[in-house]
Structures are given as structure tokens and as C-alpha cells.
Amino acid sequence: MSSYALDKRNAKVLGVCAGLARSAGWDPTLVRIGAVALTLFALGPLMILFYILVGAFTPAR
């Protein structure tokens, strides 16, 4: 697993999910589906806040 950084090249919104997928070697679509599922069924506004904070304070590659 490599170090985490935003992936602006494959980004849909801020590049958070694409960066996580790249650093873990996963498919970005599956990470995005997981993030949406967590938002809708578990964490709600906390997940949205987490996503925005990670996008704002993480360097991009």
C-alpha cells in the first residue's frame, strides 16, 4: 500500500475516493459505491463532513 494522496486525474468530485482506491489497489467505482452506501445507511452527515475535510487538507498527486 502506497501513501495516500488525492487523485485529481480520476476524480469525480475532489479525488478522495480515487486516491483511496489508487493507494489500496482497488477499483475506484467500488470505493465510490462504498462511500455512498456509508453516507446513506450509516454515517450520513459525518461522512460528508469527513469527505470534505479529507479533500481540503490532503495533498494531490
Image (cartoon, grey):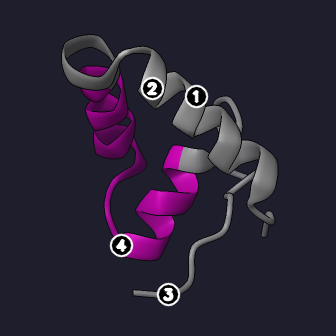
Which is more N-terminal, label 4 or label 3? Answer: 3
The residue where tag 3 is placed is 2
Q: Residues within 10 Å of mark 2 (few under 14, many from 20)?
A: few
Q: Is residue 15 above or below residue 48?
A: below
Q: Residue at x 74, y 53 (%)?
A: 9
As helix, strand or loop, the secondary structure at mark 4 comes to loop
Label tally: 4
Provide the residue span drawn in magenta: 17-38
Earlier sequence position, callout 1 versus callout 4: 4
Marks 2 and 3, how far apart at CA = 26 Å
Q: Which residue is mark 2?
A: 46
Residue furthest to the left in view is 41
**N-terminal-most mark, 3 or 1:** 3
At 33% from the left and 54% from the top, the residue drawn is 27
Check contact, mark 3 vs mark 1: CB within 8 A. Answer: no
Q: Residues within 10 Å of mark 3 (few under 14, many from 20)?
A: few
Report which residue position mark 4 lands on: 25
- Percent coordinates x, y for residue 35 in the rendering: 35, 33
Say which residue label 1 marks: 49
Q: Quadrant of residue 59?
A: bottom right
Q: Secondary structure at mark 2?
A: helix
Q: Nearer the viewer, mark 3 or mark 1?
A: 1
- Furthest toward the bottom, the residue is 2
Choose the circle earlier in sequence order: 4 or 2. 4
Q: Position of residue 39 (x, y in %)?
A: 34, 20
Q: Are marks 2 and 1 in contact (CB under 8 Å)?
A: yes
| Eye-nearest disc, 1 or 4 | 1
Whole-percent x, y for residue 14 in the image: 71, 38
* Whole-percent x, y for residue 44 in the image: 36, 15
User: What's the amino acid at mark 4?
Assistant: Gly
